[in-house]
Image (cartoon, rainbow, N blue to C red):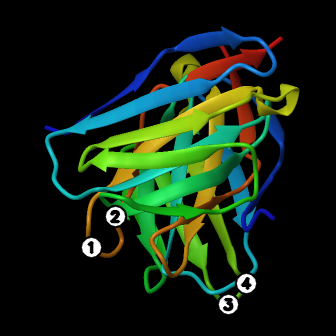
Amino acid sequence: SQQGEEDPQALSIQEGENATMNCSYKTSINNLQWYRQNSGRGLVHLILIRSNEREKHSGRLRVTLDTSKKSSSLLITASRAADTASYFCATEAAGNKLTFGGGTRVLVKP
Amino acid sequence: SQTIHQWPATLVQPVGSPLSLECTVEGTSNPNLYWYRQAAGRGLQLLFYSVGIGQISSEVPQNLSASRPQDRQFILSSKKLLLSDSGFYLCAWRGVGTNQPQHFGDGTRLSIL
């Protein structure tokens, strides 16, 4: 079963707009990670946020984590056509294994 | 710097044929290694992971097996492929220690005819 569930499943925005996607999970975690996948390619790691962190930034990316609600969000600011991809959250509990959600497909229109 | 190689990129195999997919990692020692399968438009399902040579953990019962003959080599195999084995297979590595990300290869698109 999937630990993380992303919402929405798909998102279409204009270039320059912000994109926000959410992830919910069910059990206690050590950290939560976000990955990007371009069509037909492998996953690229974006951000790792630890269970004792609430917010993290990397360039145009902002991730929040609310462990009380078991949820996380990924915000992409000032989106570009190159941000078109699928975005996955993944949770790591014990055992150094990741459990992935189903992903959010983001389309950024020029 | 670390790199991960996965091949072949695409593979078309008949039902009942054997399978061998290889993944190698460079620039790191004693990595954790992982095999995932991804159905079209879906998330990743963990198939196998390994914390060391000869140490394989299977996550789901299936028609596949994995082996780690060397520290930085991870092989996914099958003796007889089924139609349901079609999918996108991804290899990944992770460094030792807590709170480490995983790093993925470019995947193998496997089609069973």
Q: Quadrant of the C terminus of chain A?
A: top right
Q: Secondary structure at mark 2?
A: loop
- CA neighbours of label 4 inside 10 A, class few (<14), some (14 to 19), many (20+): few
- Label 2 resides on the chain identified as B
Q: Residue at x 66, y 40 (%)?
A: B37
* Residue beneath disc 2: B100
Q: Where is residue B16 shown, x and y percent of the image?
A: 78, 22
Give residue B75's mark.
Answer: none
Give residue A69's mark.
Answer: 4
Residue A53 vertical placement versus B95 (above, below)? below
Q: Secondary structure at mark 1?
A: loop
- Label 1 resides on the chain identified as B
**Any part of residue B109 in sight:** yes
Q: Where is residue A72 shown, x and y percent of the image?
A: 64, 68
Three-letter amino acid code at disc 3?
Answer: Ser
Q: Secondary structure at mark 4?
A: loop
Q: CA distance from mark 2 to mark 4?
A: 23 Å
Residue B44 vertical placement versus A44 (above, below)? below
Q: CA distance from mark 1 to mark 2?
A: 7 Å
Q: Are marks 3 and 1 in contact (CB under 8 Å)?
A: no
Give residue B97's mark.
Answer: 1
Q: Nearer the viewer, residue B36 or B85?
A: B85
Q: Quadrant of the N terminus of chain A?
A: bottom right
Q: Are marks 1 and 2 in contact (CB under 8 Å)?
A: yes
Q: Where is residue B108 shown, x and y percent of the image?
A: 56, 22
* Residue beneath disc 3: A68
Q: CA distance from mark 3 to mark 1?
A: 26 Å
Q: Residue at x 75, y 28 (%)?
A: B81
Three-letter amino acid code at disc 1?
Answer: Gly
Q: Residue at x 26, y 73 (%)?
A: B97
